Image (cartoon, rainbow, N blue to C red):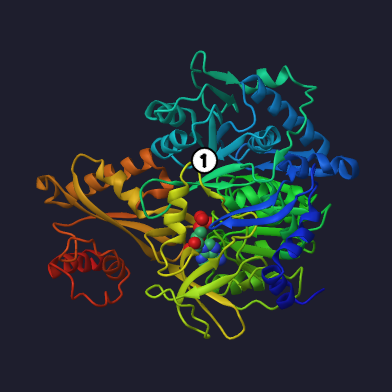
Amino acid sequence: MGNFADFHARSIHDRDAFWAEQAKWVDWKVQPQQICDYSHPPFAKWFVGGETNLCHNAVDRHLAERADQPALIFVSTETNQEKTYTYRDLHAEVQRMAAVLQDMGVVKGDRVLIYMPMIAEAAFAMLACVRLGAIHSVVFGGFASHSLASRIEDASPKVIVSADAGSRGGKVVPYKPLLDEAIKLSAHKPGKVIMVDRHLAAFTPVAERDVDYASERAKHMDAVVPCEWVESTHPSYTLYTSGTTGKPKGVQRDTGGYTVALAASMPHVFEGKPGGTFFCTSDIGWVVGHSYIIYGPLIGGMATILYEGLPIRPDGGIWWSLVEKYKVNVMFSAPTAIRVLKKQDPALLSKYDLSSLQALFLAGEPLDEPTAKWISEGLNGKAIIDNYWQTETGWPILSICNGVEKAPSKFGSPGKAIYGYNVKLVDDQTGEELTGANQKGVLTIEGPLPPGNLQTIWGDDARFVKTYWQTVPNKLVYSTFDWAVRDEDGYYFILGRTDDVINVAGHRLGTREIEESISSHPNIAEVAVVGVADQLKGQVAMAFAIAKDTSGLTDLAGRIKLEGEVMKVVDNQLGAVARPSRVFFVSALPKTRSGKLLRRAIQAVAEGRDPGDLTTMDDPAALQQIVELVKA
Ligand code: AMP
């Protein structure tokens, strides 16, 4: 055990020596020549000159010591499948998938888009891509055709790997029609689509384009596909996330820095040990799924559970039964999932032997105190560790690092700045650093961003600089777009986004994307979407729209009909995750005299709060309408 303050200080002030040490957690084909090249800020290059491979570190390197140990445990309570792949099995499956991708012409640097449910083949596909040096782009299976199309267009994949369907709560969710529609909408067309047929939803393959994975795999049962050694700075993947504008950003990650960051986080943050079991309940479509369902635990030589299903089916004890059965040591989930479980019979928590569990990590959205208390008591005082990060960073920014030095948690705080992160709170108007305790500022990170963080936005360096590094006046710092305070002990408290991003059940959504989708309904003239506090999901999207033709809206039935149509548009274009909880119809939206939408004011009144200073508002009646609608 060390001293965390010293550990952190060294990571900042003796940066290269610190990260050179962390780089030893990773297998390199060629050792790095330079630890960090920050000669062109804000672009950081980590472990320059080094050559490695992410798949080698996650799979192959473990074969010598743990070939017969479980690596991937696939559990589906949707299709009642349960299968354990040892490291040897995983190695074979990944090579089969890699051989199929090679047959489709995939080589180093090509993009492969993965649009899949939570099945083992999704993990094989991700690992197979990085094995070949191809860049994967996983799109969350809950996204619909428009969201998918914009990602296909931006990533321009040579190949797409998909499946006939997912399943949710026992209901089949077909993927193929959404994929076909997305390819139709996209200007870029993939050469091939590899279909994993689960026989859940019948589909007609597109001739010349669609190939059946089972038949292709059968040709490669003994495949030997060596890892392609790539430069440390070679992109491993892109992952799209929402921001202020409607166009999603492709967060681009490197290879060497990401591998080192995840490898080091296993002992330092998660206290995960080789041979142990990690259970992360996220989805591979999100960053938490990339880092802590797939890469982190495998790099750390652990078994990882890939779970398809709901937390309450067949009952609210399912996750705890998996903890008992697979002797899970580290669990990672989101506050919304715990709030869902909190509504179930508390006896389900004491029914299982949870003695293997060391800690439960929670991230993705604020952890409220009642939820934290409930789960902490339910788990008999085991560590509940709130940690804060973003798609962009790839691993936590704030957490307790019990693997470095044991420290208490504070309710409502994700802890302190993790090693490598030079976190600064700054005044949003002046850019001045706020050094005192309990001062509210924007949470920023001074460059270079540590290993594992985004390199740039895919294909758009200028947007990377402009979006993240030029929003704080007078300073070149990375903005997280979150407000925060830090107390006298160095613990941070996150207070919400500074931009128009909302967080629904831990899913990050841009209000502009939802507005654009709603506006495509022929009868919508204008719309404002805001995030409104919700007991279960943290936030939900709420829409206030102006209809072009209001004749049908004079009675309730007409309003309900249009509301239903608008929700359907969002479902079809973006996916149900983005569907607003309500669409209210108004005759005007509150704006400033210069025509800027007053989102903060709308959000405040939608949450029943005081809207604050309204001196710049053009038409007070517009806001009053919203007050009354929400009250009713
Ligand atoms: P995503 O990129 O989807 O992971 O979303 C990142 C955003 O989620 C952050 O910028 C925060 O607004 C929010 N977030 C993530 N983790 C936490 C946490 N532990 N506490 C509060 N907010 C969080």
Q: In the figure, is residue 146 to the left or right of 2?
A: left
Q: With respect to residue 197, does 610 lie above or below?
A: below
Q: With respect to residue 507, does 548 lie above or below?
A: above
Question: Which residue occupies the foreground of this view, 441 or 525?
Answer: 441
Q: With respect to residue 219, does 156 lie above or below?
A: below
Query: Where's residue 381, x and y in %?
Result: 70, 74
Q: In the figure, is residue 288 to the left or right of 91?
A: left
Query: Dot 1: within a 10 Å radius of its alpha carbon, few (fewer than 14), some, or many (20 or more) residues?
Result: many
Query: Where's residue 553, x and y in %?
Result: 14, 49
Does the rendering let one see residue 339? no
Locate residue 470: give its quadrant: bottom left
Image quadrant occupied by the C terminus: bottom left
The amino acid type found where label 1 is placed reads Val
Query: Where's residue 507, x and y in %?
Result: 48, 54
Q: Which residue is mark 1?
A: 139
- Residue at 66% x, 73% y is 377
Q: In the figure, is residue 507 to the left or right of 620?
A: right
Question: Which residue occupies the foreground of this view, 479 or 272?
Answer: 479
Q: With respect to residue 115, does 525 lie above or below?
A: below
Q: Residue furthest front?
A: 39
Image quadrant occupied by the N terminus: bottom right
Question: Which residue occupies the foreground of this view, 406 or 236?
Answer: 236
- Residue at 23% x, 49% y is 560
Which secondary structure, mark 1?
Answer: loop
Q: Residue furthest top?
A: 207
Locate residue 613: give its quadrant: bottom left
